[in-house]
Amino acid sequence: MKTFSQSDLDAIDQLWRSVPADHVWTGWSAAGAEPEEVWLYRTRAHWRKFPLRKTDKGFELFDERDRKVAAAASLEGLLTAVEGIPGLRAETDS
């Protein structure tokens, strides 16, 4: 698994700070100087925590059950991916 550099973490933080306060992406966290995962927090119907992993092709998001739910080549694409993931209620209503 690839690790996130400090510049990756700074870019994630800058991107997160650029979204409006009522955006579905509510925050993020990471542990360590060069983590293998970053956690994105998102809410729509319920709180959700998504592990974000860096790959050779960009970034991949996983759900609570470690299923890949989105992939993006860039951090900007990641923002669109986060916006497109349904809330828990939307998933259970299907």
Image (cartoon, rainbow, N blue to C red):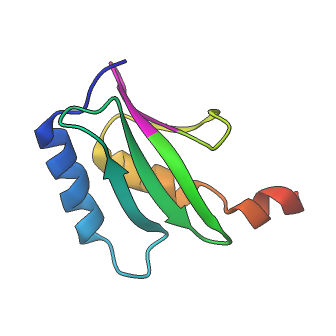
Is residue 89 shown left or right of residue 93?
left
**Residue 33 quadrant:** top left
Percent across and percent down for residue 72 are 41, 38
Q: Is residue 1 magenta?
A: no
**Extreme residue in the right direction:** 94
> 31 or 64: nearer the eye?
31
State whether the magenta stretch is mostly helix, strand or loop: strand
44 above or below 83?
A: below
Percent across and percent down for residue 89 are 77, 66
Is residue 17 shown left or right of residue 44?
left
Q: How many marks?
A: 0
> Residue at coordinates 61% horizontally, 43% vertically from top-left?
63
> Residue at coordinates 30% horizontally, 45% vertically from top-left?
75
Quadrant in the picture for the N terminus: top left
The residues colored magenta run: 52-61
Q: Is residue 54 magenta?
A: yes
Percent across and percent down for residue 13 are 22, 57
Percent across and percent down for residue 64 are 64, 44
> Residue at coordinates 47% horizontally, 59% vertically from top-left?
41
**Residue 8 quadrant:** top left
**Extreme residue in the left direction:** 7
Is residue 67 shown left or right of residue 42?
right
